[in-house]
Image (cartoon, rainbow, N blue to C red):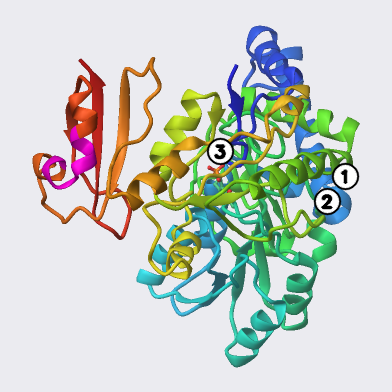
Amino acid sequence: MSIYFNNAATTWPKPDCVARAMSDFLGSGGANLGRGTASARDLGTMDLVLECRERVARLLGGYENASPVYVTFTANVTESLNIVLKGFLKPGMRAVTTSMEHNAVTRPLRHLEKNGVELKILPCDRQGYLDPEKLAAALDAKKADLVVLSHCSNVCGSVQDLEAFAAVCRERSVRLVVDTAQTAGLIPLNAAALGLAALCFTGHKGLMGPQGMGGIVWQPEFARLCEPLVEGGTGSFSHVETQPEAMPDRFESGTGNLPGIAGLNAALKWIEERGVDAIRAHENELGSRFLAGLKKLDGLILYGLPEMVDKKRLSVFAVNFEGVDNGILAAELSSRGLETRPGLQCSPWGIGRWAVFHRGRCASVWAVSTPPLRSTKRCRSWPIHWRPYAPQSCRRNERAGKLIVPIPADTVCRDFFVRNVPRGTSATNVFRRRSGFGQVFCRNFCAVYTPFLLYSPHPCAIIRLRIK
Ligand SMILES: Cc1ncc(COP(=O)(O)O)c(C=O)c1O
């Protein structure tokens, strides 16, 4: 059985009640929302959606005493952030953000920048934190219309001091929008108490719901200031030819993901029954064990805070191994039953910074994001003493100027990462130049190779060997 370490991308497995609720909706409910209000089936859908809005408002601190009216649903937090940023920011306005953002924030902001919005990116420190004083100084130096930031980095698990940021913004009357993709369901949140203009969430990570669900908890006044990104049928005010002003309809045109709402509703009930603090305590315990195991590994570079400090860090870990491409390492780990995520993690600003920290010596790319399972008993069984042999052997062989990596007897196909290959070098020349390779070749392997550039700043190649 493989063990899933990619919960920062999406949590899995979900509580059983999630799939059951979705199946029940499709199998025995199934009516559209507001496109029929007479039958019990229609009313069932209305009740379901209202119940889910109420749960979101309770869990995330909705405005006007957790009113469901100021919760709108989207497909994911990316859509939520696009709605908020593009709905509010106009040419001539100024937005401030951090260097640890996900592309869900980065890309809409870059798009807006091209259209005349001024953008200020504040650099986080090496562990992925922004000092609230720096935000205060930036806002004092030049007024901004909006601050947008991720509560927790999906790369290294750094949790920003949201209370302090909210206070800084409140004192200066600057609107604050927060991406809670990694924290909703794991850290208590209260949009109204913090005075957030908008709290954007996704349903499929810490909230344990299905993919394709997200949403926004709105400050009522801010919702009035935002232009809807999509207009159309809402099942309400049909006599009016323009988009309704009324919430939540203003931001919900077209048929929504109703099976997804059924699943999210069940997941939120599951979270309510357990409690956010208990879930986080469980995850912290797993994270501490995992971190302790990671620290024992030779040649491992860990980014972010090296301790599990409650509410300062979640169990999302970014690591790098010298001398091996993490894409290949992830494939190797996967073949041994550990599912991790290599790559840029959709966060080029943060990861790019670490490449520089590492004196440009990263063999290639980058982080493996390995949060433990958040939900089920199965997570208890993961091995914290796993020792990937590839990095060690690669380093050893590199020192010897060889390319050989130990190949298990049952290997059918293996990829090798070769670094410092000048751009344009043919694979044949790579073979010739690396003496160690000949030995592998002689042992009845033939080579199928694909020289190509990874995301690395360094030229590199992948060589694939297959048993003859
Ligand atoms: C911090 C952060 N923001 C935004 C996103 C985008 O989430 P979604 O794909 O659900 O829109 C993610 C997902 O990895 C994330 O971790």
Q: Quadrant of residue 111?
A: bottom left
**Residue under label 3:** 75
Q: Which amino acid type corresponds to the residue marked 3 in the rendered image?
A: Ala
Q: CA distance from mark 2 to mark 3?
A: 23 Å
The stretch drawn in magenta includes residue 8: no
Categorize mark 1 by other alpha carbons within 10 Å: few (<14), some (14-19), many (20+): some
**Residue 3 in sight from this viewpoint:** yes
Q: CA distance from mark 1 to mark 2?
A: 8 Å
Say whether disc 2 or disc 3 marks the residue closer to the N-terminus. Answer: 3
**Residue under label 2:** 188
Q: Nearer the viewer, mark 1 or mark 3?
A: 1
Residue 277: mark in rendering: 1
Residue 244, above or below 275: below
The stretch drawn in magenta includes residue 435: yes
Categorize mark 3 by other alpha carbons within 10 Å: few (<14), some (14-19), many (20+): some
Q: Which residues are magenta?
A: 431-438
Left or right, 107 with respect to 250, comes to left
Q: Which amino acid type corresponds to the residue marked 2 in the rendered image?
A: Pro
Say whether disc 1 or disc 3 marks the residue closer to the N-terminus. Answer: 3
